Structures are given as structure tokens and as C-alpha cells.
Amino acid sequence: MYTKEELEIVDYIETQNPKSIENLSQRIDIIKTAVTTKYTKRKAINLKVLESDIERFKSKALEEGMPYQTLINSILHKYITGQLIDKRSIA
């Protein structure tokens, strides 16, 4: 059984007579490079954080075996991508 999207692709191939892309592997490499550049580029920011919170980050990072900036970045990334789990909501 095909999904709706798969049926649309089959229909396009059968009715529109699509053409092959010249230099396909080169085009794929260009797109991969563009995506990698876009989603791995880092930008420095400045935040004012309570000194006591920084000390807690440093302590937790030491437990995790990583620099505290890496821990903060990981927490921010997980939060913004919906991967951060609040243990209080699990119980």
C-alpha cells in the first residue's frame, strides 16, 4: 500500500516525464555542504547569568565530564528542539 506522497511521486514520474539531473553527485555534494554549513554554524552570544547559577552549571558539568558552556549549549538545544524532559512532569 502506497502513502499519498508516494502515489503523487509515482503519478509525477508516469505523467510528467521528468528529466535526469546533470552532475547529480556534484549537486548533492553542494546541497549537503550548504545544509551542513547552515546547521552547524555557531554564533557567540552574551548572557548575564546569576553567579550562583554559573557555579551550579560548573558543578553539574563536572559531574557530566564536560565544560559548563557545552552543558548550557546542550540544555538550550534540547529545550528549543523539544527534547528537554522535565522530570517533575513524568512522576
Image (tube, rainbow, N blue to C red):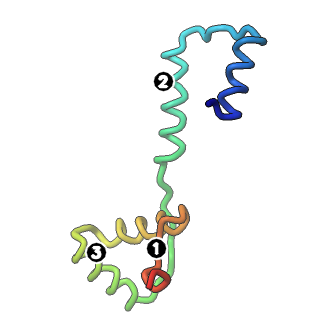
Q: In this image, 33 relative to 16: left or right?
A: left
Residue displayed at 54% across by 34% down: 34
> Which residue in the structure is indicated by mark 2?
29
Q: Taking 15 as reference, is 40 above or below it?
A: below
Assign the N terminus to one quadrant of the image: top right
Give the total of numbered labels: 3
Which residue type carries mark 1?
Ile
Classed neighbour count for the residue bearing mark 3: other residues with Cα under 10 Å, few (<14), some (14–19), many (≥20): some
Assign the C terminus to one quadrant of the image: bottom left
Q: Where's residue 90, x and y in %?
A: 46, 80
Q: Where's residue 38, x and y in %?
A: 54, 43
> Which residue in the structure is indicated by mark 1?
85
Which residue type carries mark 2?
Asp
Classed neighbour count for the residue bearing mark 1: other residues with Cα under 10 Å, few (<14), some (14–19), many (≥20): few
Upstream in the sequence, badge 2 or badge 1?
2
Residue that protrudes farthest toward the front in the picture: 1
Contact (CB < 8 A) between labels 2 and 3?
Answer: no
Q: Taking 26 as reference, is 47 above or below it?
A: below
Local SS, label 3: helix
> Which residue in the structure is indicated by mark 3?
61
Disc 2 and disc 3: Cα gap in Å? 37 Å
Upstream in the sequence, badge 2 or badge 3?
2
Residue displayed at 48% across by 48% down: 41
Residue that protrudes farthest toward the right in the picture: 15
Q: Where's residue 65, x and y in %?
A: 21, 69
Q: Where's residue 17, x and y in %?
A: 73, 8
Q: Taking 6 as reference, is 53 above or below it?
A: below
Q: Taking 55 as reference, is 33 above or below it?
A: above
Local SS, label 1: loop
